[in-house]
Amino acid sequence: MPTIGVGLIGTGFMGKCHTLAYRSVRAVFDTPLSPRLVSVCDRRAAAAEQHAAQCGFERATDDWHAVMDDPEVDLVSITTPNKFHCEMARAALAAGKHVYCEKPLALTLDEAERMAAAAAEAPGKTIVGYAYTCNPLYQHARGLVRSGAIGRPLFFRGVCDEDYQADPELPWSWRSAKAEAGLGVLGDMMCHLVSMADGLLGPIDSVLADCRIHYPTRPADGGGERLAVENEDVASALVTFKSGVTGMLSSSRAAWGRKNHLAWELHGDAGMLVQDQERMNELRIYRNEGPKSDQGFKTILAAPAHEPYGKFCPAPGHGLGFNDLKTIELANLLQAIADDVPARPDFTEALRFERVIHAIARSAQEGIRVQAG
Ligand SMILES: NC(=O)c1ccc[n+]([C@@H]2O[C@H](COP(=O)([O-])OP(=O)(O)OC[C@H]3O[C@@H](n4cnc5c(N)ncnc54)[C@H](O)[C@@H]3O)[C@@H](O)[C@H]2O)c1
């Protein structure tokens, strides 16, 4: 079994998710490449050491350049804050490595374009962490749309709400600074919604948007001074897809009670599809068929019939979780590397989503409809 040497940079929320995926992907998917956990990096040396010891990496470092220089690393996971994505990804590609980068692609559109250009010229494959599109029921929904199950698509309404910044007194973090995070809720959450809308209906053509900062300052971690929040807490946009379908997207990071309300509905002229990631093992469909007295939404539960659910579990209705989506995402990347074909979404495709979120930001700032493609 050929192995692929893995380097991971960043051991926080997403770093752990990537590691779990590396550890389970071959057991679940019998992938053509077997990950070997070579090197883990965190700028906090103790965190890197702890992650290596707990998760089985061969070495730990607090210098990400060491990962790029390591000849035994073939694939680099970038799970650091957004401001590092561009520099790290370009260094990895220049070193001939494959790159598994977390979303959003970068701080700015200019950086994202440079990343896509570097990827286009490099031998390495790239993928960006839009894991919700790996949900087997989302993929099933795509198939239903293509097969005409709800007729001609008319209208898309999508929401991506969480409450992780709903508390006005929550301490300031890197996510609130333009120099660290770039966009606010647009880069953190709206981009997921854009990736899902794009997968169902194709590219978004133009947007007319509004963005707001609800809480302009937050206390510094540990108390004392208050620091400025520089990016949007909430964003809303009217969108037109290239196909002519219209829609509405909105996203808030200050929506009390919402934990992962990444939800969408697609209206067709013969029915409707509805999905919410807080109930990620369900897909609802309404079809305008049969006697009116019996019509209503039907709930489809995730099952082995929805590939690749069955790779994880032979029993319907038992449910997958968020980390399983990352395992599917990684399996897609390893298969693409083995087959020497682009992974999806690669940097080029992710750049399309990036253009939409930056178009939303510009539209809100300038008060005009903006082309996204
Ligand atoms: N796909 C998803 O659903 C999803 C969910 C959450 C976060 N993300 C993305 O993942 C990325 C990381 O977010 P997170 O929530 O894991 O953040 P986090 O703060 O939990 O972890 C970031 C880690 O990177 C380390 N780090 C920071 N600078 C570094 C450097 N220069 N060198 C090495 N290590 C460094 C930090 O010490 C920390 O351990 C962000 O881009 C975020 O947008 C994606």
Image (cartoon, rainbow, N blue to C red):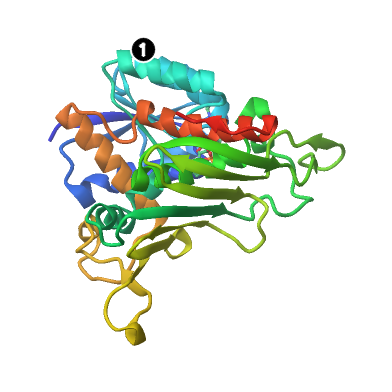
- Residue 195, position as x, y percentages in the image: 42, 42
The residue lying furthest to the right in this view is: 224
Where residue 231 appears, as percent x and y from the top left, is: 69, 35
Q: Nearer the viewer, residue 274 or 160?
A: 274
Q: Quadrant of residue 83?
A: top right
Q: Image point 23% across, 70% down: which residue?
A: 315
Disc 1, SS: helix
Residue 108 % position (x, y):
56, 24
Q: Residue furthest left?
A: 1
Q: Residue 126: x percent and y percent?
A: 33, 27
Left or right: where 15 falls relative to 330: right
Q: Is residue 64 visible?
A: no
249 on left or right of 299:
right
**Image position of 284 (left or right of 177):** left
The residue that mark 1 highlights is 94
Looking at the rendering, which quadrant does residue 296 occupy? bottom left
Dot 1 crowding, Cα within 10 Å, few <14, some 14–19, many 20+? some
Vertical placement of residue 193 versus 347, above or below: below
Tell me which corner region of the image, top left, top right, bottom left or bottom right, holds residue 36.
top left
Q: Quadrant of the C terminus?
A: top left
**Depicted 80 relative to depicted 198: above or below:** above
Kind of residue sitting beneath label 1: Ala
For the point 24% across and 30% down, the residue is: 4
Q: Residue at x 34, y 30 (%)?
A: 346
Picture residue at 24% right of the left edge, 35% below the top: 334
Nearest the viewer among 264 and 127 is: 264
For the question of whether residue 320 can be seen, the reply is yes
In which quadrant is the N terminus drawn? top left
Q: How many marks?
A: 1
Q: Is residue 18 above or below residue 230?
A: below
